[in-house]
Amino acid sequence: MKPNPKFLTHVTKGEHYMISTSDTKFKGIVKNNETAAFIVECLKSDTTESAIVDKLLTEYKGADRPTVERDVANIIGKLRSIGAIEE
């Protein structure tokens, strides 16, 4: 799983964005929160949901696995729904 190359990522003033190009069905900009931005960065290296969960648990001490798994699945589901992820 990796980001669709037709979506550009950009960081400005600490804000993380995904921008669709003209060749996508989704037309717009996605502003990512800190967790979503972390997930998008993980996706830049072909990865799995499980690997992303493991990285988040390492990054955020004290987070519980079921919550992180649910959050990752939710964010990845939203990115899939707009075509921002390739399997």
Image: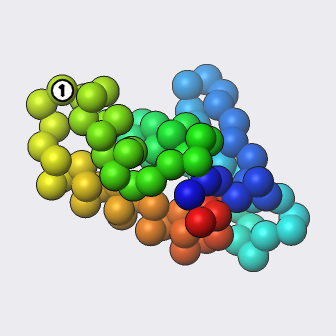
Count how many numbered circles sit on residues in the image. 1
Q: Position of residue 3 (x, y in %)?
A: 64, 53
| Residue at the image position 15 percent from the left and 54 percent from the top | 66
Q: Position of residue 62 (x, y in %)?
A: 12, 31
**Identity, as a three-letter code, of the amino acid under mark 1:** Lys
Q: Position of residue 10 (x, y in %)?
A: 69, 36
Image quarter of the C terminus = bottom right
| Residue at the image position 46 percent from the left and 37 percent from the top | 38
Give residue 69's quadrant in the image.
bottom left
Compared to residue 40, the image places residue 20 above or below, namely below
Specify the farthest residue to the right: 22
Which of 49/36 is in front?
Answer: 49
Which of 45/33 is in front?
Answer: 45
Q: Which residue is mark 1?
A: 61
Which of 29/24 is in front?
Answer: 24
| Residue at the image position 55 percent from the left and 69 percent from the top | 80
Compared to residue 62, the image places residue 32 above or below, namely below
Q: Position of residue 6 (x, y in %)?
A: 79, 58
Image quarter of the N terminus = bottom right
Task: Evaluate whether residue 33 shows in this view.
Answer: no
